[in-house]
Amino acid sequence: MRLKAIATMLMTATLLSACGVAVKNNNSQNTPIVFTEPAVTPPFYALNPFNYAAPPAFEVDLKQAHANKLIVPTVDSNQANMKFAPAAGHNELDVTQIDDFLQLVEGKARHYPPQFTNRNERRGFETKLREISVQLDALAANRNASYDVLIRAFKVSVMARNLDMGTQFTTKSLQYAQRLIKMSPNDPTTNFWFGFSLSEGGGQREAIPYLDKAIKGGVQEAYLSAVNNYLFLEQRRNALSTLHTYKVKYPEESKVVDRLVMEIEKQGRTNVWENLTAMKQGHY
């Protein structure tokens, strides 16, 4: 079952404390206690950074795979190279469960600050993120590690950094990004992830060329990341200009743009992602 392992981790502490109560209730009422898995809280804003109106890549890949698994090479491949097969072969990795989890955690922690309302849910995500990080780090240690391995290791490191899981993830994210940029300097996904991770990690000026490349590469979310970046740099004119271009390019986002413009004019420097979260939750 999807997220079964995570749900089990999330419930461990609750089950331990609840069992004591359950025993008393069971003795007095002689009725069984049924525990259900907690639902994962809604994702943040959108799950497809390239096109908010389209399903994320993982869902498309999973649909195409049918009964097969999502398989990627682990070495000697400088671009995304997924295939569908019953099982991974030599120098291959089954990323079906990894990508399933990454889609979930991206919806909560792709940008800083992460969006969690449940502490146990966050702990469960962190535990699973560490496990995947260890697995991918081992594969990425190869000098000829594939793009598919490196991009997933990079994403894991960025999200672990956003979750404040340790300074080592900041170091690893930079190392993976540098290898990916060297491998494929114009790749939109790499430039998008490197751009916003630099921006939200304090490297706002260094982030500009990468976010620009991501915008030119068709990454919708790169516009909003660039706006957030310009606001950090207190370049309000550039932020508003980027929002205007975004509104023209994606007219369906007009309501979002108008709200962000209003907040910028009212507050000056503001955090795009926190504003979007407030919009989604209906706070204004």
Image: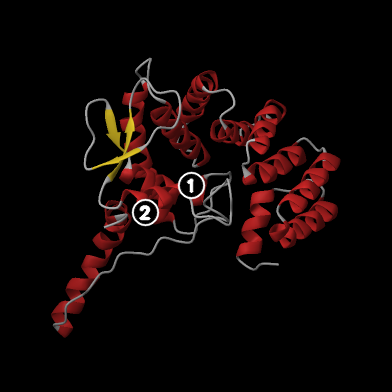
Question: Which label number is shown at residue 106?
Answer: 1
Question: Which label number is shown at residue 59?
Answer: none
Residue located 49% across and 42% down the image: 163
Answer few, some or many: residues within 10 Å of disc 2's Cα (few below 14, many 20 plus, some between 14 and 19): few
Q: Quadrant of residue 241?
A: top right
What's the residue type where badge 2 is placed?
Answer: Lys
Where is residue 140 drawn, in percent x and y? 37, 23
Residue at numbered disc 2: 63
Residue located 72% across and 27% down the image: 205
Among numbered discs 1 and 2, the one appearing first in the sequence:
2
Where is residue 165 drawn, in percent x and y? 45, 37
Up-down relation of residue 219 to residue 44 (above or below) = above
**How many labels sit on residues?**
2
Q: Nearer the viewer, residue 264 or 164?
A: 264
Q: Nearer the viewer, residue 163 or 151?
A: 151
Q: Quadrant of residue 214?
A: top right
Q: How is the image coloured?
A: secondary structure
Is the C-beta separation of discs 1 and 2 under 8 Å?
no
Q: Nearer the viewer, residue 27 or 184?
A: 184
Up-down relation of residue 153 to residue 41 (above or below) = above
Answer few, some or many: residues within 10 Å of disc 1's Cα (few below 14, many 20 plus, some between 14 and 19): many
Where is residue 70 drawn, in percent x and y? 32, 42
